[in-house]
């Protein structure tokens, strides 16, 4: 009888630890998807921003659209920074948070009183930092996430 109880206890603990492992795998995959989406959003912005900046210089509506996009991007970065990453991705998440903070700071500087200062945006570190973030996507893939 003691052997049966011991066997049941071992099986239950294996089952519980297996569920925990599956939960960690699911969390890791979910985080990888969110991080990839976040990086792609920043990358898309970096690709389209130069054209949008040129249009904004000549067109008031384009300027408002660019300002709205920057404000939305700041909000998305702040939301991403608040994610609690799985253990395997903590280092990469910290790097992404640090880069996001640099971009947020730069974007807030070029958004003087809620309006974009077009003459200042191209002299910021925004686009360089986004390129650095894009390189982190490869690290995510290397983790197998």
Image (cartoon, grey):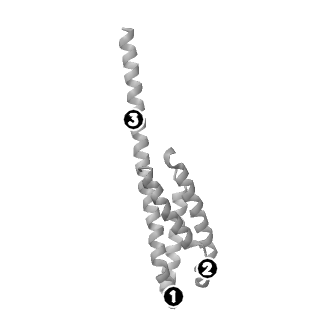
Q: In the rendered image, which residue does mark 1 sit on? A: 60
x then y, percent, for residue 80: 51, 58
Q: In the rendered image, which residue does mark 3 sit on? A: 19
Q: Residue 119 sits in which quadrant?
A: bottom right
x then y, percent, for residue 116: 58, 80
**Mark 3 secondary-structure assignment:** helix
Residue under the image location 44 percent in, 57 percent down = 34
* Marks 1,2: beta carbons within 8 A: no
3D distance between C-alphas at marks 1 and 3: 55 Å
Closer mark to the observer between disc 1 and disc 2: 2
Horizontally, is 135 left or right of 115 in the view? left
Q: Is residue 19 shown above or below 40?
A: above
Horizontally, is 124 left or right of 35 in the view? right
Residue under the image location 39 percent in, 33 percent down = 18
Closer mark to the observer between disc 2 and disc 3: 2
x then y, percent, for residue 10: 40, 21
The residue carrying pointer 3 sits among few (fewer than 14), some (14 to 19) or many (20 or more) residues within 10 Å by Cα, namely few
- Numbered badge on residue 123: 2
């Amino acid at each position: 009888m003691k052997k049966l109880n011991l066997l049941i206890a071992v099986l239950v603990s294996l089952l519980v630890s297996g569920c925990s492992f599956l939960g960690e795998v699911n969390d890791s995959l979910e985080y990888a998807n969110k991080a990839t989406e976040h990086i792609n959003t920043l990358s898309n912005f970096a690709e389209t921003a130069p054209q949008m900046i040129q249009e904004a210089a000549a067109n008031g509506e384009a300027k408002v659209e660019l300002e709205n996009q920057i404000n939305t991007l700041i909000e998305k970065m702040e939301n991403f920074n608040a994610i609690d990453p799985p253990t395997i991705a903590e280092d990469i998440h910290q790097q992404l948070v640090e880069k996001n903070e640099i971009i947020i700071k730069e974007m807030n500087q070029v958004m003087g009183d809620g309006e974009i200062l077009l003459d200042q945006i191209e002299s910021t570190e925004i686009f360089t930092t986004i390129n650095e973030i894009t390189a982190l996507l490869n690290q995510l893939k290397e983790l197998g996430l």
